[in-house]
Image (tube, rainbow, N blue to C red):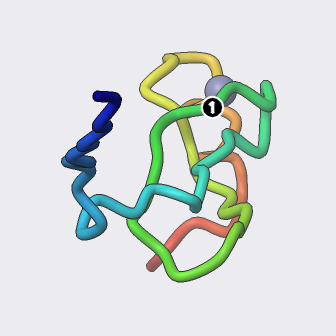
Amino acid sequence: MGMEIGYQSSDKDALELGVIICKHCSEIIGTLPMDGYKKVHGICPDLDCMKTDDQKESAG
Ligand SMILES: [Zn+2]
């Protein structure tokens, strides 16, 4: 007798298709739960990148 019962336990709620990429060093900072693959630009905690970003328009 050959019976195969396979139970698949995968969390479908955990969608992490979006990636946050540092716009300065192109480092992947993290992932975001999204419906589709998407690239989001952000700033990584790197001091150099943060400083570079500060050079941009200064909020006054
Ligand atoms: Zn960076």
Q: Looking at the picture, does residue 32 appear above or below residue 7?
A: below
The quarter of the picture where the N terminus appears is top left
Q: Label 1's element?
A: strand
Residue 15 occupies quadrant: bottom left
Pick the residue in front: 7 or 60. Answer: 7
Pick the residue in front: 30 or 26. Answer: 30
Q: Quadrant of ligand 1?
A: top right
Residue at left offset 34%, top offset 29%: 2
Residue at left offset 79%, top offset 25%: 25
Lateral position of residue 48 relative to residue 39, left or right: left
Residue at which label 1 appears? 28
Pick the residue in front: 55 or 45. Answer: 45
The quarter of the picture where the C terminus appears is bottom left
Q: Amino acid at mark 1?
A: Ile
In the picture as drawn, the residue positioned furthest to the top comes out as 47
The x, y position of residue 31, in whole percent, is 46, 48
Q: Looking at the picture, does residue 50 appear above or below residue 38?
A: above
The x, y position of residue 33, in whole percent, is 39, 66
* Mark 1 neighbour class, 10 Å CA radius: few under 14, some 14 to 19, many 20 or more: some
Residue 45 occupies quadrant: top left
Residue at left offset 67%, top offset 39%: 22
The x, y position of residue 40, in whole percent, is 66, 63
Pick the residue in front: 18 or 54. Answer: 18
The x, y position of residue 23, in whole percent, is 77, 45
Lateral position of residue 14 relative to residue 40, left or right: left
Whether label 1 lies within 8 Å of ligand 1 gets the answer no
